[in-house]
């Protein structure tokens, strides 16, 4: 597999993960994340379609900036920035739902403590 293709697929994922954890979820996951359904982390049938859509657009942007219209600065930074800003804009409304979420060690939920 070509290194450019790997970058095109993973760079948008990193941007989404950074926005999701550090900005939207406010650097906190609670034991609620271990629930199969319901709770503050539930998405449509378990899939965050906003994240999937942004990932696809970021990967397409990377591909276009690599092969169709080569960018003089490369494709990594622009595709990261596009994915970062787009996911932040589309997810900002859900940020309030995570206010006050306490940090929890996820292993405590497995042990039942």
Image (cartoon, rainbow, N blue to C red):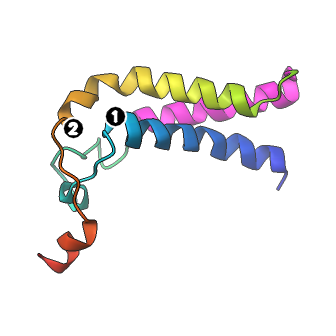
Residue drawn where x is 66% and y is 35% of the image = 59
Q: Position of residue 19 (x, y in %)?
A: 45, 35
User: Which residue, as the protein is rendered here, is positioned at the far bottom?
Assistant: 111
Q: Quadrant of residue 25?
A: top left
Q: Is residue 28 magenta?
A: no
Q: Quadrant of residue 83?
A: top right
Q: Is residue 1 above or below residue 90?
A: below
Q: Secondary structure at mark 2?
A: helix
Q: Position of residue 81 (x, y in %)?
A: 61, 26
Q: Quadrant of the C terminus?
A: bottom left
Q: Position of residue 79 (x, y in %)?
A: 67, 29
Tell me if 34 is positioned left or right of 23 in this view: left
- Classified by dominant secondary structure, the portion drawn in magenta counts as helix
Marks 1/2 in contact by CB < 8 Å: the verdict is: yes
Residue drawn where x is 26% and y is 29% of the image = 94
Q: Which mark is residue 78?
A: none
User: Which residue, as the protein is rendered here, is positioned at the far left?
Assistant: 113
Q: Which mark is residue 24?
A: 1
Residue drawn where x is 57% and y is 44% of the image = 14
Tell me if 42 is positioned left or right of 3 in this view: left
**Mark-to-mark CA distance, 1 and 2:** 7 Å
Q: Secondary structure at mark 1?
A: helix
Tell me if 37 is positioned left or right of 88 in this view: left
Q: Is residue 17 above or below residue 84?
A: below
The magenta segment is 49-71
Q: Position of residue 87 (x, y in %)?
A: 46, 28
Q: Quadrant of the N terminus?
A: bottom right
Q: Which mark is residue 98?
A: 2
């Amino acid at each position: 597999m070509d290194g450019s293709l790997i970058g095109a697929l993973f760079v948008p994922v990193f941007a989404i993960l950074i926005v999701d954890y550090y900005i939207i979820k406010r650097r906190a996951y609670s034991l609620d994340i271990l629930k199969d359904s319901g709770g503050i982390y539930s998405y449509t049938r378990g899939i965050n379609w906003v994240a999937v859509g942004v990932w696809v657009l970021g990967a397409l942007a990377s591909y276009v900036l690599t092969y169709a219209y080569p960018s003089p600065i490369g494709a990594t930074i622009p595709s990261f920035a596009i994915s970062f800003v787009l996911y932040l804009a589309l997810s900002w409304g859900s940020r309030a739902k995570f206010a006050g979420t306490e940090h929890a060690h996820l292993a405590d939920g497995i042990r039942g403590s």
